[in-house]
Image: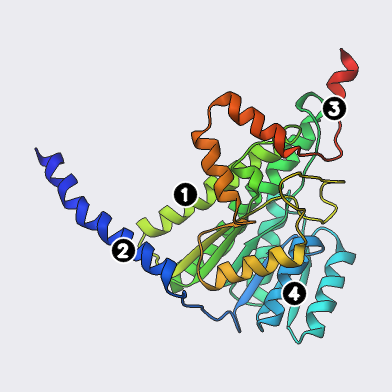
Amino acid sequence: MHTALELLRLLPLLLLAYLEALARLLLPPRRKSVQGETVLVTGAGHGLGRSTALEFAQHRSRLVLWDVNQHGIEETAAECQRLGATVHTFVVDCSKREEIYRAAEKVKKEIGDISILVNNAGVITPADLLSTQDHQIEQTFAVNILAHFWTTKAFLPTMMKNNHGHIVTVSSAAGHMPASFMLSYCSSKFAAVGFHKALTQELSALGKDGIKTTCLCPIFINTGFVKNPKMRLTPILEPDMVAKKLLEGILINQKMIFVPSSLNIFLFMEKILPERALAAWNKLQAIQFDKVVGYRNKE
């Protein structure tokens, strides 16, 4: 009986939640300013990380850029400085926990608190499972998900103290829809989506409503990350466009960003289609990219 009463009390809350969601659809969302915020972007030496840094530079944010490639990160910094941004660079290997912690302490000591953290660094080994080396699997998880834990643990305490901040998780469409010959990558990106959702819920449970979270999930981006990607139903994205979508989502505190937005339809279809129909749908998409399929050579 007690449970039934609690369920009845839940109905007005559900109605209110639907009305709020409808209002957000009909009314333009409020945009916040990131001017003067100190933003740390990992994997900022090229591709989406570089484009994201440039977007923040145009919004007059202070930038802290991390990448394992010194030449790449210096090029990104120079472009951001030409836009008038203050930029600090650090060569950091995000596959190594202690290196992340050391760099984080240096940032806090020399620059100050980070208020927006963009966990963007990522790696991929496009190959079938049996052709993927153990160390490649370990590196994929170290960079694509474990680094999110270490950077967040390093910079979250000050955000919690101030009840102010934003943590951005760059995942992938592969974090929702699996793809062949990307097993370790997909697994790590599924973990990244789970990290974002669990962190969001935990911050809410702790009453830290001033700390926002966003998760970005794009399809293939033209960064050289994957060689010669092709899809029949959707175009390959350019990093500048994806970065603009990301920043727009950050400014309105959007929790989940799919690029393109039509990915929502694909995710819905995955939930409702029978297995055989889903297999036919995946075949229709004709996802292709350069990969190693060593198993065929062993037959």
Which residue carries the number 2 mark?
19
Q: Earlier in the sequence, mark 1 or mark 4?
A: 4
The residue closer to the viewer here, 179 or 231, is: 231
Eye-nearest disc, 3 or 1: 3
The quadrant of the rendering that contains the C terminus is: top right
Quarter occupied by the N terminus: top left
Sequence-first disc among 2 and 1: 2
Kind of residue at badge 1: Ala
Mark number, residue 54: 4
Q: Give the mark, 2 or 3, whose residue is nearer the N terminus.
A: 2
Q: Give x and y (percent) for residue 32.
A: 51, 79
Q: CA distance from mark 1 to mark 4?
A: 29 Å
The one of 21 and 1 positioned closer to us in this rendering: 21
Q: Earlier in the sequence, mark 3 or mark 1?
A: 1
Q: Nearer the viewer, mark 4 or mark 2?
A: 2
Which quadrant holds residue 179? Answer: top right
User: In this view, which residue lies farthest toward the bottom?
Assistant: 84
